[in-house]
Image (cartoon, rainbow, N blue to C red):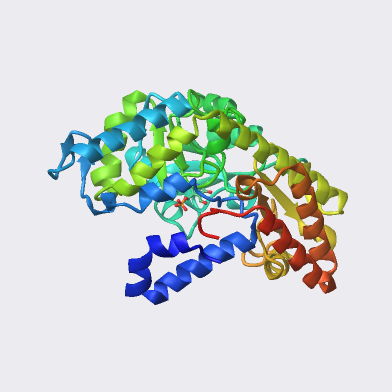
Amino acid sequence: MITEVYEKINKDLKEIDPEIYDLIVKEIIRQGEGINLIASENYAFKAVLQAMGTPLSNKYAEGYPKKRYYSGCEYVDIIEELAIKRLKELYKAEYCNVQPHSGAQANMAVYFAILRPGDTILTMSLNCGGHLTHGSPVNFSGIIYNVVHYEVSRANELIDYDMIRDLAIKYKPRLIVAGASSYPRVIDSKIIAEIAKEVEAFFMFDMAHYSGLIAADLYPSPVNHADFITSTTHKTLRGPRGGVIIAKKEYEKLINKWVFPGIQGGPLMHVIAAKAVAFKLAQSPEFKDYQRQVLINAKILAEELKNQGIRIVTDGTDSHMVLCDLRSIGLTGKEAENILNEVGIFVNKNVIPFDPQVPAVTSGIRLGTPAITTRGFKEQETKELAKLIALALKEPNKKDYIKSKVIELSQAFPVYKIYL
Ligand SMILES: Cc1ncc(COP(=O)(O)O)c(C=O)c1O
């Protein structure tokens, strides 16, 4: 149910475009009724949504604070300066750029700043947890650059740092990339920085998944180790959809030039305002408590699924993410995603290291605890959820029972109380 308050605030939209209004309402209800375990998603802070839904969206502000190509930028200048100041404080960084429209564009800006077509980049293989923009053949990064991949060890599924060093010495990449979409463990940026130094390569750390945990000092920070750090702002950070770049001060001019005019036009000032709000909230003690609970919940989820006979990749987690190998219960990732979707638990199928299945099928699912923790799930609810997941996967005839339990759980922890 949508509240009267919500209807009143959105009266114009409802009248002008009932079709879109209805679909938004349906999506809000879907987000509220289901349980979201998609590791890359979260519920943004309400204040973040409020900053985004403003006339700041109307403003063109090509350029940077006090050096714009448009007039009337006096207020958006202050907003962008605040976002920059807060992001620098949050990560103890020397320089940052808050304009990238997305994580992919943050990565693109760094690549364009330091690489030329045909240059070699050394990145984690997608099969082992790397991201599309880390050299996938279907992405610009794999099309423009010569990509060499490092992998995790077959024995323990942890990053093989010796392999990174051997490949770096052999191929002399111009850039080494770390950071991942589905690697649940700590990544040692200090070792990779040393390797990069040895072979005179740049080092970029894409912290898109871990940025909230890093902001709360609960995951090792790549700042001071990597030359460039990129991130999204909408995952563990609970900000708006978007990207950022952090770097050493010496790269300020280069990176700024490659974000604008290099790859983007006008910055999204409503999103930059919302980023500023998220960076402020991420400095609060409550945010640290939240991230602590994200980690606790992820450990409980991994432990309980393991107790239920599901193999956990790397045998556990140091982050918000748990990767399950479903061969242990005779299912594919695709089958598991569909079964869980039917009972209102949202997850994504995911390749596991050295996956024998194609990416459209996979042997695994990736689970993440940021969204359920935002809702207020603690140890007890997470344990209950893990049991429901295992039951759904192992006993499909109990679907109706599980679905009713999922609704019960989600109703006890409403998202955005104003809407529902
Ligand atoms: C590690 C990593 N880098 C970059 C991105 C791309 O972010 P966006 O979807 O905002 O382009 C993602 C998104 O999932 C990611 O996981």
Q: Vertical placement of 217 versus 392: above or below? A: above
Side of 373 where 268 appears, left or right: left
Residue furthest to the bottom: 19
Q: Residue at x 62, y 49 (%)?
A: 375
Question: Is 55 on the left or on the right of 389, as rendered?
Answer: left
Quarter assignment of residue 250: top left
**Which residue appears at 45% of the width and 59% of the height?**
5
Q: Position of residue 338 (x, y in %)?
A: 69, 69
**Which of these two is toward me, 330 or 116?**
330
Q: Quadrant of residue 364?
A: bottom right
Residue 192 vertical placement versus 354 (above, below):
above
Left or right: residue 196 compared with residue 358:
left
Q: Is residue 301 above or below residue 67?
A: below
Q: Quadrant of the N terminus?
A: bottom right
Q: In the rendering, at what x and y percent does residue 139 appear?
A: 45, 57
Judging depth in this view, the residue of 222 and 307 nearest the camera is 307
Q: Among all residues in the image, which is located at the extreme left? A: 71
The answer to whether residue 104 is above or below residue 405 is above
* Residue at the image point whose x is 79% and y is 71% from the top: 399
Residue positioned 45% across, 61% down in the render: 6
Q: Is residue 102 visible?
A: no
Where's residue 63, x and y in %?
21, 41
Q: Please state, as top left, top right, bottom left or bottom right, where the C terminus lies in the image.
A: bottom right
